[in-house]
C-alpha cells in the first residue's frame, strides 16, 4: 500500500475511530494488516512527534499573546489543566480501584496538559490512573524537570507565571522552581480577589478549548477498550500533537 494511503488509514482511525473491519473493507486489505499498519505508524509518529521541541521561548510566546491576555497576564506563559479519558472497566479489583475517578464516577486515565495563551499544546504528560489527584500528577510527571530545563536555557525566567484552576494545589512546588502561580482564590474572597478570579476564569478556558480539540479525535473521546491500553500513551501523545495542526483556539 502506498505511504499516503497508509497515513490516511491511520488518520481515519484516529479521527473517526472506524473499527478495523471497516478500515479493512475501505482499503481492501485484511484486518491483521490494518492492525500492523496502525501500530507501526503510531510508534513512528510517537517517536517523531514526541521528540519535537514544542515549548517556544518566552519572547515568542509574548509576541503572539492575544492582546487582552497580554494586558492582564503578560508574564504568564502557560496554562495547565488535567483531563481524563474513559476506559473499559478493568477485570481486576485493584485496576478498578486505581482507575476509579471521583470526578467522572467511572474508570479513567488522567493526563496533565499545558498550553500557551493561544491554545497550542506545549506539554502533555503520560496517562496515569484516574484516582490520582491533580497535584500528585504534577509532582510525578515530567513537567517539573521540563520547567527546570526551560529556566536553565532561558526559555523561561524566574518569576514567570503558570495559570491553573482553583483546587490545583501546586503553589509550593511552583515557587520552589522559582516561578509564580496564578490560581483563583478560594471562597469568601474580598472584592480584588473576585476580580482576579474572574480574569483567570476567562483565560483558563484556553486550555479547556485545547483539550476539546484533542477530543475531536474520536479514538480518545469514547470509552477506550482494554485491548488498546497497550499503546494508549503513544496514541494520546500523537493526537495531542496533531491537534496543534488545527486552527488556533484563540485568535490574536
Image: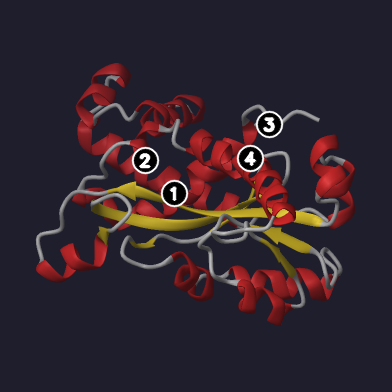
- Circle 3 SS class: loop
- For the point 50% across and 62% down, the residue is 167
Marks 4 and 1 close (CB-CB < 8 Å): no
Of mark 4 and mark 2, the one earlier in the sequence is 4
The CA span between labels 4 and 1 is 19 Å
Marks 1 and 2 close (CB-CB < 8 Å): yes
Of mark 4 and mark 3, the one earlier in the sequence is 4
Q: Which residue is mark 1?
A: 236
Of mark 4 and mark 1, the one earlier in the sequence is 4
Q: Which residue is mark 3?
A: 248
Q: Position of residue 116 (x, y in %)?
A: 71, 47
**Is the residue marked by circle 4 packed among few (<14), some (14-19), or many (20+) residues within 10 Å?**
many
Of mark 1 and mark 3, the one earlier in the sequence is 1
- For the point 51% across and 26% down, the residue is 4
Q: Nearer the viewer, residue 167 or 235?
A: 167
In which quadrant is the C terminus drawn?
Answer: top right
Name the mark nearer the viewer: 4 or 2.
4
Horizontal arrangement in the rendering, residue 122 relative to residue 71 (left or right): left
Q: Which residue is mark 2?
A: 220
Amino acid at each position: 500500500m502506498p505511504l499516503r494511503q497508509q497515513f490516511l488509514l491511520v488518520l481515519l482511525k484516529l479521527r473517526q475511530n472506524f473499527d478495523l473491519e471497516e478500515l479493512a473493507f475501505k482499503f481492501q486489505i485484511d484486518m491483521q494488516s490494518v492492525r500492523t499498519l496502525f501500530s507501526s505508524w503510531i510508534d513512528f509518529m510517537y517517536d517523531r512527534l514526541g521528540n519535537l521541541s514544542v515549548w517556544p521561548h518566552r519572547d515568542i510566546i509574548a509576541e503572539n499573546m492575544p492582546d487582552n491576555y497580554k494586558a492582564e497576564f503578560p508574564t504568564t506563559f502557560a496554562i495547565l489543566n488535567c483531563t481524563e479519558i474513559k476506559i473499559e472497566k478493568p477485570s481486576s479489583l485493584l485496576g478498578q480501584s486505581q482507575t476509579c475517578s471521583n470526578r467522572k464516577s467511572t474508570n479513567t486515565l488522567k493526563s496533565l496538559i499545558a498550553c500557551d495563551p493561544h491554545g497550542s499544546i506545549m506539554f502533555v504528560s503520560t496517562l496515569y490512573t484516574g484516582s490520582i489527584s491533580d497535584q500528585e500528577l504534577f509532582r510525578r510527571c515530567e513537567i517539573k524537570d521540563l520547567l527546570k530545563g526551560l529556566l536553565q536555557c532561558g526559555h523561561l525566567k524566574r518569576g514567570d507565571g503558570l495559570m491553573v484552576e482553583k483546587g490545583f494545589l501546586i503553589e509550593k512546588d511552583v515557587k520552589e522552581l522559582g516561578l509564580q502561580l496564578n490560581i483563583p482564590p478560594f471562597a469568601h474572597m474580598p472584592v480584588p480577589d473576585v476580580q482576579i478570579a474572574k480574569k483567570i476564569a476567562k483565560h483558563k478556558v484556553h486550555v479547556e478549548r485545547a483539550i476539546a480539540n484533542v477530543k475531536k479525535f474520536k479514538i480518545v473521546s469514547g470509552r477506550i477498550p482494554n485491548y488498546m491500553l497497550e499503546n494508549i500513551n503513544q496514541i494520546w501523545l500523537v493526537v495531542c500533537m496533531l491537534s496543534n495542526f488545527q486552527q488556533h483556539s484563540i485568535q490574536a
